[in-house]
Image (cartoon, coloured by chain):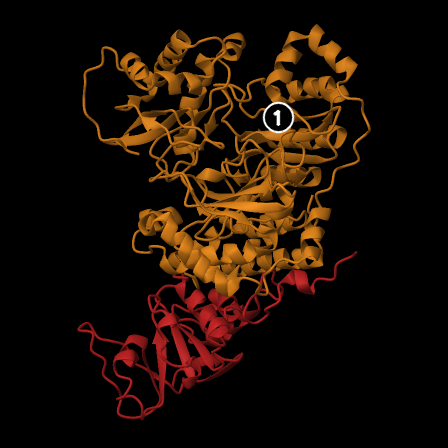
Amino acid sequence: MYIYDDYDQKIVDQRVAQYRDQTRRYLAGELTDEEFRPLRLQNGLYIQRHAPMLRVAIPYGHLRSAQVRKLAELARKYDKGYVHFTTRQNVQYNWPALENVPEMLAELATVQMHGIQTSGACIRNTTSDQFAGVAFDEIVDPRPWCEIIRQWSTFHPEFAHLPRKFKIAVNGAKEDRAAVMVHDVGINVKLNDAGQVGFEIFVGGGLGRTPMIGDLIKPWLEPKHLLTYLNAVLRVYNRYGRRDNKYKARIKILVKAMTPEVFAAKVEQEWAFEKDGPQTLTDAEIARNHRFFTAPAYESLAGDDAEFAAAKAANPAFARWVERNVFAHKVAGYAAVTLSLKKTGVPPGDATDAQLDDVANLADRFSFGEVRVSHGQNLILADVKQADLFALWEEAKRIGFATPNIGLLTDVICCPGGDFCSLANAKSIPVAQAIQERFDNLDYLFDLGDIDVNMSGCINACGHHHVGNIGVLGVDKNNAEYYQITLGGRQGVDAKIGKVIGPSFAQEEMPDVMSKIIEVFVAHREGDERFIDVFDRIGAEPFKAKVYEGKPIRKEKADV
Amino acid sequence: MSKLIINREIVDNRWTRVVANEQGEVSLPSEGAVLVPYQYWLANRDALSNREVAVCFAPTDEPESLPVDANVFPMIACEFPAFTDGRGFSIGRLLRVRYGFKGELRAVGDVFKDTLNYLARCGFNAFEVRADKDINEAIKGIDDFTEFYQSSVDVPSPLYLRRPVAA
């Protein structure tokens, strides 16, 4: 993992001092609400439905156990004893007092954490594959590149006040677990035939009000040019992105308005001035960042562990958990484990302070003291010996993190929704819970196989409903909460935006609607076909026919 | 005379800034150093040739369109209609880095303590702090951060070229 040196620490400490002063001046009336707002947002502080909400960065999803313990301590001390993990590798406190935030940030700084650029119109926390460095299908470890981008983007003076937020994701595996196609800038780290590293740059993807898949504007970028090229992209966006309408201010709108070809040409033109400039990466700097992401002290193991195999054979529940929650590792005898934060009855992505402390202990005991956070709002222990999996499973069960549902219908990606978020039009947590309750039969869930269900409480799409195989969007109709269904979305290398199937449903209808969608899937499924493959084969019509069966036909403007 | 910060000192502002009225007209004072909108200067270059003149770039103005060496101006200003409009950061940086402007680069408009550090790093060395803000407090904002990761106008080499690295 990346470890701060004196320079990194000084930058974070100076931020704490700056924000402490900004808070003081705000409370003293020297800064207006309007002035303080962008300043606090760039430090992750929202004013929310019930209280301020503090968003803390987890750069590319990596945490050390000491950091997890600090998160737990802050939850106890300044919040209501729990935190929420988001889809963007951040963690949120829902109830801090505004006056306490400087102190929280000061405490976070002691474990090399912060809220820098977790919100606001700036370059946000860079996200990546939760299995980076360990995935069996990895081509290039994306983390050193994420760290290089993290440093370049932190307090970038020219891009401190962009037209809108700006999100960068980096992927280095065959599968895309970082959803690069739906980011402002998506980067695939590749190898060419000569074994050299290079980047494929997508621009203009994103969800929200105008969901779009990014366009490939640079099929091959040499590593040393990464930052000068990003600088050129950002400068074009900063200067020409729309500022007159916040709904049209994201880079995707600019790329579309210019056309990707013209946008790419404009970036090349700008880059011509930047290329080989002072921000060109040196071999030494690239090597320095790689040194932080070397393999931990793995034992030399002989492949599949015999005891592990025996435990699976003897214990179907354990085998089931292994099948869903254990991911193949590139090192023989090891595995990556996903701890599910999607237990029925618990808001997706939430963890209590006690659970966090327990996870930190598990990380120390089983996974070199490291914890990761996934885009799917779960926690990962990335380097567990196969021989330890059974012991880990028993501990995870005790904590409530062993629900064997990763990738299944109940592993719902879900934003905090109207229960917490002041932007939301509708609640999302109770709907997610009702669906989880409806599909609580594990055997049945297992039989259904991989289904991504993504829910957002509003059009901002924090729950990424557009790229869920089944997407649920909370909408407001005459001050009542309704839910709109999209089908066919997916993330990954074949990312696609789902289509709205028709008029929305009341909250109480949602479990039945979900059941009907699943019934159609099961009726048409051939063998072990995945939901998304069935959908691609039969289209939306059979699903529509079933969910709207017997309902009066009414027209409604699609809200996506 | 109003005050501003130039090169970390609080000094008198000797420039009179003129802006277009609602009809788009600009009326100049009869004498003295005058800061005019860049577009007005473009349209009235000859008439202004005998004046001590500086230009003010609006966020939509493009330094690329400068028909002369930027250094013919003793001062160039960039307007920040709102501090959250970051276009002026890019304009300032381009004027310094791409067009080699050596003179006074001044930030005007919604300028106060919390933007000075970023502005300085984009090449601004003069700050017309908003009249309702305490300029003595604001000047401290220049040093909110004293160490930076990325290349900037004031410190062109990124941290990785300055940071001692263990082999």
Question: Residue at 64% of width from left, 43% of height from top?
Answer: A194
The vertical placement of A17 against B57, above or below, is: above
Which amino acid type is shown beneath numbered disc 1?
Answer: Thr
User: In which quadrant of the rendered view does residue B77 lie?
Assistant: bottom left
Position in image of residue B140 (x %, y %): 54, 71
Give the chain letter for orange. Answer: A
Q: Residues within 10 Å of mark 1 (few under 14, many from 20)?
A: many
The reply to whether residue A60 is visible in this rendering is: yes
Question: Residue at 59% of width from left, 44% of height from top?
Answer: A59
Name of the residue lying farthest toward the right: A300
Give the chain letter for red. Answer: B
User: In which quadrant of the rendered view does residue A309 lie?
Assistant: top right
The vertical placement of B68 against A558, above or below, is: below
- What residue did someone put label 1 on? A338
The chain identifier of the residue carrying mark 1 reads A
Position in image of residue B43 (x %, y %): 25, 80
